[in-house]
Image: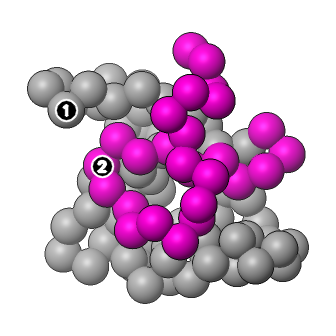
Amino acid sequence: MNKTSGVIRDLRKAPEPGDIYELGNNEHVTVISVEAGEVRYAPGAVEISIFRDASEEVMRSTVAMPYRMFRKWLATISAGRRVDTPPPG
């Protein structure tokens, strides 16, 4: 998959399922779900169809993080500060 097409570079955008964020240094995270104050994401750029669920392999690699913490993590990267990537779960 071409990781640069459709990738979100403005890290201030609110996460939605299927979004792929470019974190820099050729690192990406894909949002799998956003619900009940929690974001589930998978490391890497993974194409998720809105018509079908993510594969079992992708689901095993997902990490849950509180929504506010995920947004803060993205904002920190956007501001150019150094943080762990992918974010700790």
| Image disc number at residue 17 | 2
Helix, strand or loop status at disc 2: loop
Q: Residue at image x 60%, y 37%?
A: 44
Q: Quadrant of the C terminus?
A: bottom right
Label 2 vs label 1: CA separation? Answer: 8 Å
Q: Residue furthest left?
A: 51
Q: Residue furthest top?
A: 1
Residue found at x 33% / y 30%: 48
Residue 4 appears at what percent x and percent y?
Answer: 64, 30
Q: Residue at x 43, y 84 (%)?
A: 68
The correct choice, above or below, for 24 with respect to 46 in the image is: below
User: From what the image shows, is residue 65 above or below residue 15?
Assistant: below
For the residue labelled by badge 1, is the local secondary structure a helix, a strand or a loop?
loop
Residue 72 in the image: state x and y as whole percent: 56, 83
* N-term-proximal mark, 2 vs 1: 2
Q: Is 49 located above or below residue 73 in the figure?
A: above
- Residue 39, position as x, y percentages in the image: 36, 65
Answer with left or right where residue 18 lies relative to residue 29: left
Kindly identify the amino acid type of the residue bearing the numbered disc 2: Pro
Q: Position of residue 84 (x, y in %)?
A: 77, 66
Over which residues does the magenta segment extend? 1-26
Location of residue 86 (image quadrant): bottom right
Q: Is residue 49 left or right of residue 64?
A: left
> Which residue is nearer to you in this view: 54 or 80?
80
Residue 44 appears anywhere in the view: yes
Neighbor class of circle 2 (other Cα within 10 Å; few <14, some 14-19, many 20+) is some
Magenta stretch prevailing secondary structure? loop
Q: Which dot marks residue 50?
A: 1
Whether 2 is among the magenta residues is yes
* Type of amino acid at the residue the image marks with label 1: Ile
